[in-house]
Image (cartoon, rainbow, N blue to C red):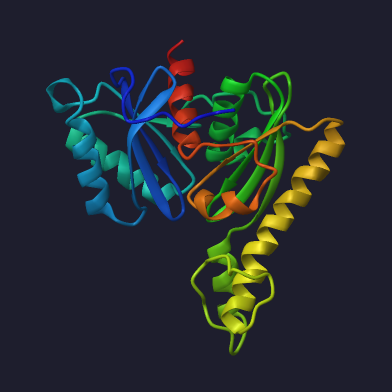
Amino acid sequence: MIADPDAGGPSPQLIVIDIGNTRTALGSWADGEVSRVSRVPTEDTEGFAAALASLGAFFTGGRAPAVAIGSVVPQALARAVEQIGTALHLEASVVGQGLPLPMEVDLPAPQAVGVDRVCCAAAAFERIQSACMVVDFGTAITADVVGDDGHFLGGAILPGARLQSRALHAYTAKLPEVEIAFPSEPIGRDTVTAIQTGVCRGIAGAVRGIVEDIATHLGKWPQVVGTGGDLDLFLPHCDFLDSAVANLSLMGIGLAWAKGRK
């Protein structure tokens, strides 16, 4: 089992930042663990600046010695790098751009794989040390596989809950965009609960099917780790998850920085 670290732990060595499509996570990293994690909307530049300043206060002299970033949003990445340079007078290390990926990627075009997927997979394997899967419940949901040799093998991508809800609203005449939630019953009694059931229970069933198919292909059931911004929503409905780690991507970004230094 993998457990999330608490807010204590070793003295921080650097700031780690994961820029996602919807949210950006910031935290301090030391010896494989992350703490003092905050999350802001990716488009909230003022919120990012405030979170960055708050983190910097935990370092000697109010300034981190290094910053490492993983990002799947190029515009937000460029903006964050500029803000870090201005506020902290540091040149951020970017995973996949100067800072190598934290594990080998056994795919025809490794540079095309999202760094968030590779960082999550690397952090999971670092702790499990055997074949594993990572299911990241984010804007998009990914289910990725690591082999016993510690190499990233690929996986599956499907739309996340909010993307599905927005698509139903955008491409139909009458269906509303609904709050994402699991209704108490699997049978929707009205349009809203029917959409909620279809989206949320549909995702849980789809991910279960993907995990089972991959396990069959591998010939064994690897440990399955859940993570991502919507983890808390899906965790009670995904009994195939062996463990849950909210900050797995930040751990993987820190791991990439540590391996890059060596």
In which quadrant of the rendered image does the N terminus lie?
Answer: top right
Image location (x, y in percent) of residue 134: 63, 38
Image location (x, y in percent) of residue 11: 28, 18
Residue drawn at x 17%, y 31% is 57
Q: Quadrant of residue 186?
A: bottom right
In the image, residue 92 sits, relative to residue 205, either above or below, namely above
Residue extending furthest toward the top: 262
Residue extending furthest toward the left: 61
Q: Quadrant of residue 127?
A: top right
In the image, residue 18 sits, relative to residue 172, either above or below, namely above
Q: Quadrant of residue 166?
A: bottom right
In the image, residue 64 sits, relative to residue 182, either above or below, namely above
Q: Nearer the viewer, residue 190 or 15?
A: 190
Residue drawn at x 60%, y 89% is 173
In the image, residue 164 sits, relative to residue 211, either above or below, namely below
Image location (x, y in percent) of residue 110: 65, 33
Residue drawn at x 61%, y 83% is 191
